[in-house]
Image (spheres, rainbow, N blue to C red):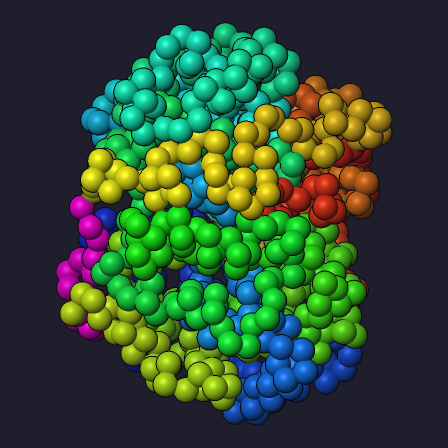
Amino acid sequence: MGCHVEVLVSNGKVVKIKPDTKSYIPASCMRFSAALDYHNHPDRLNFPLKRSGSRGKGEWQRISWQQAIDEIAGKLAGIRDKHGPEAVLALGGSPHAGDPAAWRWCNLWGTPNYFHLGKNCGEAEFLAEWSVYGELTTLSMPATGITRCTIIWGANPHDSRPPLGWKPFLDAKKAGMKLIVVDPRLTPSAREADIWLQLRPGTDGALALGMINVIINEGLYDRDFVDRWCLGFEDLKSLAMQYTPEKVETITWVPKAKIMEAARLYAVGKPALLTMGVATGHLGKATLSAVLGKCLLRAITGNLDLRGGNSFCDVPEYTAFLDELHWDKLIDHPLRKRDNVSADIWPIASVRALKLFRQAMSKVYPKGCGPAHYMVYPGPTFVWSAIVDQKPYPLKAVLTQGSNSLCALANGKRIYRAFTSENLDLHVAMDHFMTPTTQLADYVLPATDAIERVDFGLMWGFSNTFTGREPAVEPLYERRDDYQLWRELGNKLGQQGYWPDTFEGWLDKLLQPSSITFRELISREVPWLFSPPKEKRYEKQGFATFSGKVELVPSMLKKLGYEPLQGYQEPAWSPVSSPELAKEYPLILTSGGRVQAYHHSAHRQLAKLRRRYPYPLLQIHPETAKDLGISDGDSVYIETPVGTVRQKAQLVEGIHPKVVHADAYWWYPEQPGTAPCLFGIWDSNINSILPDDLEHCDYAGDNNLRGLLCRVYPAKDF
Ligand SMILES: Nc1nc2c(c(=O)[nH]1)N[C@H]1C(S)=C(S)[C@@H](COP(=O)(O)OP(=O)(O)OC[C@H]3O[C@@H](n4cnc5c(=O)[nH]c(N)nc54)[C@H](O)[C@@H]3O)O[C@H]1N2
Ligand SMILES: Nc1nc2c(c(=O)[nH]1)N[C@H]1C(S)=C(S)[C@@H](COP(=O)(O)OP(=O)(O)OC[C@H]3O[C@@H](n4cnc5c(=O)[nH]c(N)nc54)[C@H](O)[C@@H]3O)O[C@H]1N2
Ligand SMILES: [Mo]
């Protein structure tokens, strides 16, 4: 997650990696201790490979980079001639060093079918924030001595963001800040809370409306801010009046007294922060009310663009990020005739939406806003069907870079069908290791890791920060920077002139507005550009919405065909929305909470980490386990209507007896890689049995990963 380490090198070889104690973010979690093993691991990909048997057979032939690039470029050109640039899909992962280059390549190429795993990350919440107030508050942290109350909502920073992202909460608490945590589990973050709201997974939208009800009824909202800066208050008020604390207790299982107490504490605790959290974007049909509800709470309490509250992310002005990425090149690309494959179904995630957001923001941000790429992603379900059924139009090539989609996305069987479809003419995957996903590629390319390449952080354009880092050693074998994949393909496919020769050259170009080279930056003691905190920018410039105000009933949603005043909607599977199914699958399933040992599907190869965390765990309440004849450490089956996987039971008190939490992303690098085994992907990976039909997708097409149903029973040991 970008923590700093010191790498000791002898004779061009890394000998030791330790936390950089001089840095402001020294590595502290257990993962860095395995970083050297990661760099040298015998299973690392070191040379380009070309498939020789059928897809998934695991038969590979080593080829040169030149041959790989020539053949891939040749195939892409043929696909573009026959099917248009939109027939190429790029699949990117969570933070890795090639992403902006991939977005740029796609914009120049003309495909809106860029699917970044961020789709299942913060997208749903970001799009809601843009719709309501035209800004993102993703990076807000409590300010010690200033923030009086924080709600951590759907996140567990203790495990997901140590040390940079958790310490500020502790520091602020010491200075008197009150902490509220909304989480179905008693996580290490929740243990620190003054109030823990243990809700039924998926019911966040109802909880938010219940809190709004209390805040309005008790006159605790910021009247001045609402009068001057918000539109639609009366409509929101009428909606919220339907969500009495009694009713919300029934929906969420949170006692009404706690709902009222939390609402009051938050509303009077100004400046107060309400955090982003990926969980609220994983709720399928229940997502929109949840993410809007969070935005509305921030707005009516006047905590927007406020120091210590939800401050706005800065636009990346130190870098040429916005110029370099050329979103307009995608909007007006001469060859692009179609929007992404799911634009008609989820219009908020489309080029059309990108254009509308740009219009709405143009007064405040003439160059557009930062991470606009979040607006164009197609939804996964339709990506797979555009490959298998070639509808609404054919997708013919997939360029996977730094993503293990077979593990990280819902309904693995559907993804498997897509990757093995005869209609898929080309699948290229660039990674550090063979994974279930790379195993289904035609070409597999070896990437450099963070120790052997220059690296940078600009938070995907979310902020006006830029940090740089130098490589410790030359790349091993034939590993290459991810940047080079896009550059070389670009140079062969009509993008000549856009791509500096080296990754560092591109970073120099990005840094031009700051009149500093990448080298100069990284030779500084603190190699970091950042802008000082700001607040109340809206007083001068208004909000970056169509009206210039905070839109409690967002006109953006209306323009795109959504109901802008959302009441709470149940997830598609729940005791309320599907009571018959709930009889067969009586437990509420949530999944994927971060664990310190691993980054998503990665690192399972590393013995040091595997010893610490050898199996995927299903957290279950001791009473429930007892009723099912399950003891701590027993193997259990978890079954949904989509399928069955096996994990080990971990009995925990801090979970509701009707709720279970399954670890996500499990696969076993030690098992055979050949299909259908694919490193044991079907054994334990909860995502492979999560549903992805239309009824489960949220308003932007994201997967429903939390707030589902399952049953659990003893399994044969493993
Ligand atoms: N160690 C480690 N750190 C990581 C990552 C990693 O893989 N490993 N991944 C990084 C990435 S890409 C991301 S996006 C961040 C995410 O970081 P966080 O936002 O902190 O996400 P999680 O820990 O997945 O989930 C947060 C909490 O949501 C709770 N939850 C489950 N269902 C619900 C629900 O219905 N409602 C609510 N309110 N809460 C629910 C879970 O119990 C969990 O504790 O972490 C980043 N940091
Ligand atoms: N059930 C459930 N599923 C989830 C979530 C959840 O909370 N619950 N969270 C979702 C979220 S927030 C996210 S962000 C996604 C993450 O989804 P992904 O990003 O697809 O997951 P990773 O396992 O991190 O896959 C990254 C791959 O990139 C490789 N890699 C690492 N570094 C590099 C590099 O520098 N270059 C290249 N080329 N490859 C590299 C790794 O070896 C690994 O195979 O998962 C989503 N899926
Ligand atoms: Mo994420």
User: What percent of the width, then of the height, locates residue 206?
Assistant: 57, 23
Which span of residues is magenta-colored?
516-532
Q: Is residue 427 above or below residue 709?
A: below
Instruction: Tell me the residue at 58%/8% (across/down).
Output: 246
Instruction: Tell me the residue at 40%/53% (across/down).
Output: 359
Horizontal side of 21 relative to 164 (left or right) equals left
User: What percent of the width, then of the height, locates residue 537?
Assistant: 23, 40
Tell me, yes or no, whether the highlighted magenta stretch contains residue 529: yes
Instruction: Tell me the residue at 49%/29% (across/down).
Output: 293
- Image quadrant in which you'd find residue 297: top left
Q: Is residue 572 above or below residue 621?
A: below
Instruction: Tell me the residue at 70%/41% (across/down).
Output: 696
User: What percent of the width, then of the height, locates residue 690?
Assistant: 71, 45
**Towards the viewer: 498 or 329:** 329
Q: How many marks?
A: 0
Tell me, yes or no, whether the highlighted magenta stretch contains residue 301: no
Horizontal side of 131 relative to 318 (left or right) equals right
User: What percent of the width, then of the height, locates residue 86?
Assistant: 60, 71
Residue 678 seen in render: no
Residue 123 seen in render: yes
**Towards the viewer: 28 or 501:** 501
- Image quadrant in which you'd find residue 584: top right
**Towards the viewer: 204 or 232:** 232
Horizontal side of 305 relative to 517 (left or right) equals right
**Towards the viewer: 280 or 367:** 367
Q: Is residue 417 above or below residue 503?
A: above
